[in-house]
Amino acid sequence: MKQQLENILNSALAEINCAKTSEDVENIKLNYLSRKGTLNSIKKNLKDLSVEDKRIVGSFANEVAQTLEAKLADKSAEIYRAELAQKLENEKIDVTLSGTAHHEGHLNPLTSTINEIVEIFQGLGFSVMENENSPELETEYVNFDMLNFPPDHPAKDMQDTFYSTVAPNVILRSQTSGAQIREMLVKKPPISVICPGRVYRCEAVSARKNNLFHQIEGLLVDTNITFGDLKGVLNEFIRVYFGEARPTRFRSSYFPFTEPSAEVDVQCIMCGGKGCRVCSGTGWLEVLGSGMVHVNVLKNVGIDPEVYSGFAFGMGVERLAMLKYAIDDIRLFFNNDIRFLKQF
Ligand code: DAH
């Protein structure tokens, strides 16, 4: 019986030696040491032995069991370490490997120009008009009549308008100036707002003209507002937007909704005033329209012109972006050509 136990011990040790996985170890444990295992079945036969033999064989059987348990525990630990090392090896991350490049989108230069202009005016105390006061689908009444364009006055021909076929007198707004009216109808002075937005004109598309473009309208109404305030605000805007103090000139002009009216020119940023192709040899670039809000406009919206006065201005975003970034074709803003967009 002792011989039997020695055989069991040797074959178990050999198996333990060869075990490769924790599953192997479990199986060996089951085969030799469990209740139904080989060792136990030997122990069951102890009862047939003499007392003396029982003691000797019994204690040897216990020794065998203890040896096997210790060896199995060692093997388990060894396998665990090996498996862990393998796992770590498999999951190793090479932090020096170069990453996958992502193509990041970015803002269209028109959007960043609008953001930049809005920020400048916010810095001067203007706030951005709420969208509901600046619809793109507008009535002729607000777009023209309330702005003091007389009915059938040739001034209406200044802008070729898209008329709607669904409702009479509904148009795609030809200018953001109508937003002045909507703002003054719902707010009392002091008012100081800007309104960036899309406008539409029925024109042949060319390098200089698109039938959809963007304007930024400005309006300031309060007591004691003078042409000096208008000049101060617009000069400051031009200084910040074009990055340095550039000569400006306020040229007398005509808009039905302002009196007096002025167009503002900035010294040509391409030639510094000498005269070039961009400024058509004049040395000046027109950048915006402006003026003191016409008395009739104030009356139309129920603001007393005896108490309040104000100034307004409007500028084309595409034109301002084209001048600043030397872009020579307005259509580039709308084509979504990645080679163009990537430059900004
Ligand atoms: N709405 C004018 C246009 O589209 C621009 C303009 C001129 C706006 C004078 C104004 C202004 O607010 O005072 O040509």
Image: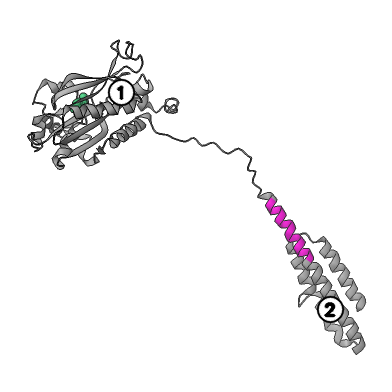
- Nearer to us of marks 2 and 1 is 1
Q: Can you give x and y, in whole percent of width and height, for residue 41 in the image?
A: 82, 79
Q: Can you give x and y, in whole percent of width and height, for residue 63 in the image?
A: 85, 76
Q: Quadrant of residue 327?
A: top left
Q: Is residue 1 left or right of residue 284?
A: right
Q: Residue furthest bottom?
A: 51
On screen, residue 91 above or below 321: below
Give amino acid for label 1.
Answer: Arg
Q: Is residue 50 visible?
A: no
Q: Is residue 312 left or right of residue 270?
A: left
Q: Is mark 1 within 8 Å of ligand 1?
A: no
Which residue was labeled with disc 1?
Answer: 319
Q: Is residue 35 left or right of residue 313?
A: right
SS category of the residue bearing label 2:
helix
Please name the residue shown 76% across and 75% down the image. Answer: 34
Q: Is residue 176 left or right of residue 245?
A: left
Ligand 1 is found in the corner quadrant, namely top left
**Considering the image in quadrants, where does the C terminus appear?**
top left
**Residue 46: in magenta span:** no
Please name the residue shown 17% across and 30% down the image. Answer: 311
Which residue was labeled with disc 2?
Answer: 62
**Residue 80: in magenta span:** yes
Which stretch is magenta?
Answer: 74-88
Of residues 48 and 83, the one drawn nearer to the viewer in this rendering: 83
User: Mark 2 and 1 residues: CB-CB less than 8 Å, in contact?
Assistant: no
On screen, residue 74 above or below 313: below
Give amino acid for label 2.
Answer: Asn
On screen, residue 203 above or below 134: above
On screen, residue 30 above or below 327: below
Q: Can you give x and y, in whole percent of width and height, for residue 7 in the image?
A: 89, 71
